[in-house]
Amino acid sequence: MRVGDNRTYLFGGFKLDASERRLTRDASNIPLAPKVFDTLLLLLQNSGRVVSKQRMLDEIWDGAFIEENNLAQNISLLRRVLKPSFIETVPKLGYRFIEPVRTTAAVPAEENETYVERKGPAAVEPDWLRSEPPETRYAQNGDVNIAYQVVGSGEIDVVFVMGWVSHLEYFWKHPLFARFLDRLASFSRLILFDKRGTGLSDRVPLSELPTLEQRMEDVHAVMDAVGSARAVLVGVSEGGPMCSLFAATYPERTTGLVMIGTYAKRIRDESYPWAPTERQRSAFFELMQREWGGPVGIEERAPSMASDPEFREWWATYLRMGASPGAAVALTKMNAEIDVRDVLPTIRVPTLVIHRKDDPCLQVEEGRFVASRIAGSKFVELPGDDHLPFVGDQESILKEIEEFVGGLKDAVEYDRVLATVMNIRIADFASEERKRNKQDWTEVIRSSRRIVDKQLEKFRGREVAYDENGILATFDGPARAIRCALSINVEARKLGLDVKTGLHTGECDLVDHTFGGIAVDLARRIADESVNGDVFVSRTVKDLVAGSGLAFEEVGNRSFEGIDGEWRIFKVTD
């Protein structure tokens, strides 16, 4: 407990004077045994946060050996004296005081009491909120430094991915956001980071802002830096698509997935009628270019706080600190191209999707759609119109996340993963005369194999098979797969060779480290359609490389025997 606490705590008609060790209601004393009083005081000092049973035993009984039943008796007595709803039991973790609390500052008796009050249940600010934000450290991914922070010490790791732009240290400059993160850290080890090009991470040229694939790699780098083998990913808004792609690609490193106010794509079409039209998106881009530096988008993202001068000023500063005008527009345009509809059905990890009913930024139908595409996911629709989860009734969101995290089971092994499959055929060995020359033919085969091996190593591909159907390889990033194929083409032409290439991103069966399934078959069928020297990809691949600088030309729809549906095929033109 806080030593020398001389504050007064006010809650639900009760008043606890820490310096005089007295609990009253309506000026009437309520006698409490010393250890019961200490139990209540410790809960009040940590209002809104989980206090572990072990911590309570250590601090209240000063390390003396005592049975846990003594603590349970204290909690039971407090619930009878106060109200049962004031103290919440968090299974397997401990207890939390959830009634709103106000504190009075320590002032001379002759002065009027000065109240320190915060919105929401957790009125008592944690010590570190009143001093400095958590320490910012850096993880290196290639040549780029990614800023991150770690808060809390729970048994389960949670990686929080903020949407749009972010700034780690400005997270903590507003009490609403600070309290939201503090509550997440009360039941986890919370890991925060700024995506490259934003916040405190390295700024990069506008042409090199992070794609979904690079954002995943940055998450990997941060998790590795803090020693996190597996984590629950919590993605807000634009953070949702990246988290969903990460969960599908790396289920072995994903304990669970939470998406708050998220979407599957950002341009409206017949099959997804809730997104903005291209004209509406263009109008928003123009607004950003004109007004960046002010509280851009606050009316849609935080309606309940849009008229609050302090919040408007904080939001405007947060955006300015998070990204330059050019980077903000470029990131928003990139996000508008994202489409993860085909990724969602491949997610196998436990998933929770939360959406507020009247969110004007992202319609609730978008959250329902996302949840409907993920087998076994839980969809929670909450009242409210604030898009930002830390504005409005944040406690309802936090309770859902805490319950979800607390219910996650031990790690499981997955036999299916999302991967980009590349099939390459050595299509032409220059001439029939060379084919008749067996020695020359053998050397060409060796040379082509060396080319492929070198490029797979460079672009972190994994060879799966090398047989009469060509070379089959897998990648955990579609942009790297495309660039690997293009590079192989360049090297092959130097030997007078052409190749036929097909790529598809989809769910693969993983058995004994061998990949199989429809995604593998589809990559081979797409390679069949390819013209010598061209790289053909499915629409799924194209949709996942937004912002990569790669260009495409539509080839048309194709149907393949034994594979359901029609598939839109594109040729890589750059």
Image: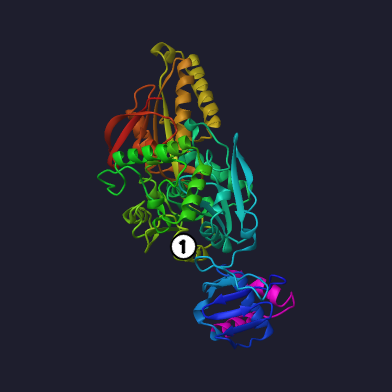
The residue range painted magenta reads 50-79
Task: Identify the colour scheme used.
Answer: rainbow
Give the residue displayed 49% in from the left and 78% down from the top: 85
Residue situated in front as seen by the camera: 393 or 525: 393
Q: Position of residue 361 (x, y in %)?
A: 36, 51
- Specify whether 34 is left or right of 276: right
Tell me the quarter of the image containing the C terminus. Answer: top left
**Residue 568, visible in the rendered structure:** yes
What kind of secondary structure does the magenta stretch mostly adopt? helix
Q: Position of residue 179 (x, y in %)?
A: 54, 61
Tell me the quarter of the image containing the N terminus. Answer: bottom right
Give the residue displayed 62% in from the left and 75% down from the top: 8
- Which secondary structure lies at badge 1? helix
Residue 527 in magenta?
Answer: no
**Residue 152, visible in the rendered structure:** no
Label count reads 1
Q: Quadrant of residue 374?
A: bottom left
Q: Position of residue 180 (x, y in %)?
A: 52, 60
- Amino acid type shown at disc 1: Gln
Residue situated in front as seen by the camera: 201 or 227: 201
Is residue 527 shown above or below 24?
above
Residue 56 in magenta?
Answer: yes
What residue would you read off at disc 1? 394
